Image: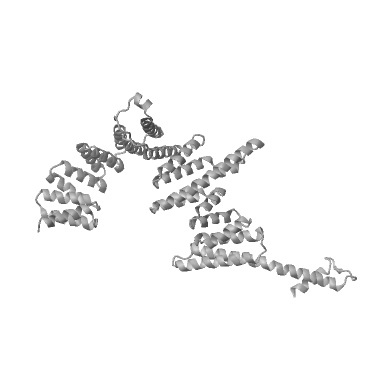
Amino acid sequence: MRLAEVLSFLRRSPRGPRLFPPGVPRVRQWLVAGVLGALVVASLVPLWDVWQVNLAGILVNRAVAGPADLSPQARKSALVEAMAMMEKAAARGPHNAAHEIPIWRTYGAAASLDPSIHAFDLLFRSRNVGRVDRVGELWLGEVADAIGNIKEAEVVYSRIDASNLLIDRAEAALQAGKKDVAATQYHLAYVSLEAAIQRDREQKLQLDRTGSAPSAAATLMSQPSERVTSLYRIGRGYLQAGQPAEAVKVLEEARTEAKTQSPGTATQQSLLFALAQALADIRPKQPNGPSVVDQTMYAIDPVVGEYVDALIRVRVLVTEAVGLGKTAAANLQAGRILLEIGDTNDGLSRLTNAVRLDAHSAEAYLALGAEYERLTMLDQARAVYVKAVKQLPSNVELAVAYAMVSFRTAPPRNALPLLVHAAGMKTSDPYLFSALGDCYLALGLTDKARAAYLEGLARSPGAKPLVSRLAALAAQGSP
């Protein structure tokens, strides 16, 4: 009926006369009608595909943000259905970019949540024939990463700056204790970020040749200082993932970039500390020989020279970092790094400064006290913990440290109340309960010693110090 109305309209001009002159054969009129009908039918295919893409998007959204009680199986079924719809839509044609780009974009979103080799192959082939846009290529990278095809993921992420996404994913993996996964994600983030930095450099060179300046909007969208922060996050992540050598490479680059594009004092200080820590972790082993290296030995012995150079580099970075802000936290970090490289005097001085600057820093007290204990300077350690528990009486770690060092330095009857107090707090430290039981034994209270060992074993099942002590009591035939 509507087709007849269209034909009636076409046969007339807006003013009323017939559009087709009387001499035009009716066959030609029906030919026009046939062409119109073919156009209507042809338009149904893309309209159907648009509807299918929309429906598949709804299924993906349901899988991602569906009701909390939606089962994992139901979410997976939604993704499988969405991908099947998109495969059929792509197969129908027409096989060109305009038709297939939205299809593969939606397919990639689903495939990134339910990755497979089949999905990767489809996206890969579509990318190679130009049927995938940048969003679709991002999904290709996500699928490649998920199935372990790191080489292809590198190729994709080097074309698209997905560094922030990958850094966030790596940090989440670190928090979950998956260091290997985190290291892989940091590697991909670095590849992506390096490629983006290179593109920016090439763009600047091109602008220099043309004499044109980038727009204000483009400058706001891409701040170089953000790249420095991203490099720092990657380097710090490598360090936390147990790969200090990789961290040094990235952090060195971040420091170079920071000289011209400062990310801010706080980030710059953290960057210097991270680089110093990474260098300390990979420093050469101390060579055999005198502990004091004179200038002559330094000059003629390349092994000693390399070792000394590494220590000097770490000390310079630490000094530069503290100079950006002499806070308790900065002195604490500096002290720990210096102690790691064997600089005991300066390390203790930094930790003492940290305690002086922040009398409520439990970390500073624990670090300073632990170093004194390592040096068997137990009276100094006890003095640190005495001050600490006065400032932070509810801190469990400080209470345990104070009780333990008191047991080693004071008579059993004086140490016992401190051990009992620490054991009454929320702690499962097996060495604390071992010391408590030993203290009871020293006072001749065998039953209480056994009870202390058993309580510690209940809080820390299978702890060897407690198991061995209980076994010794049983061997002695104590009731």
Label total for image: 0
Q: Is residue 171 left or right of residue 23?
A: left
Q: Quadrant of the C terminus?
A: bottom left
Residue 46 can be seen, yes or no: yes
Residue 285 location, x and y as percent? 34, 37
Residue 258 location, x and y as percent? 49, 36
Residue 352 location, x and y as percent? 29, 35
Q: Is residue 181 left or right of residue 128?
A: left
Which residue corresponds to the image point at 47% horizontal and 66% vertical from the top-left? 67
Which residue corresponds to the image point at 55% horizontal and 51% vertical from the top-left? 156
Q: Is residue 147 left or right of residue 328?
A: right
Q: Farthest residue in the top direction?
A: 296
Residue 263 can be seen, yes or no: no
Q: Farthest residue in the right direction?
A: 23
State the scheme by which the image is colored: one colour
Q: Image height check: is 128 above or below 306?
A: below
Q: Quadrant of the N terminus?
A: bottom right
Q: Image height check: is 240 above or below 12?
A: above
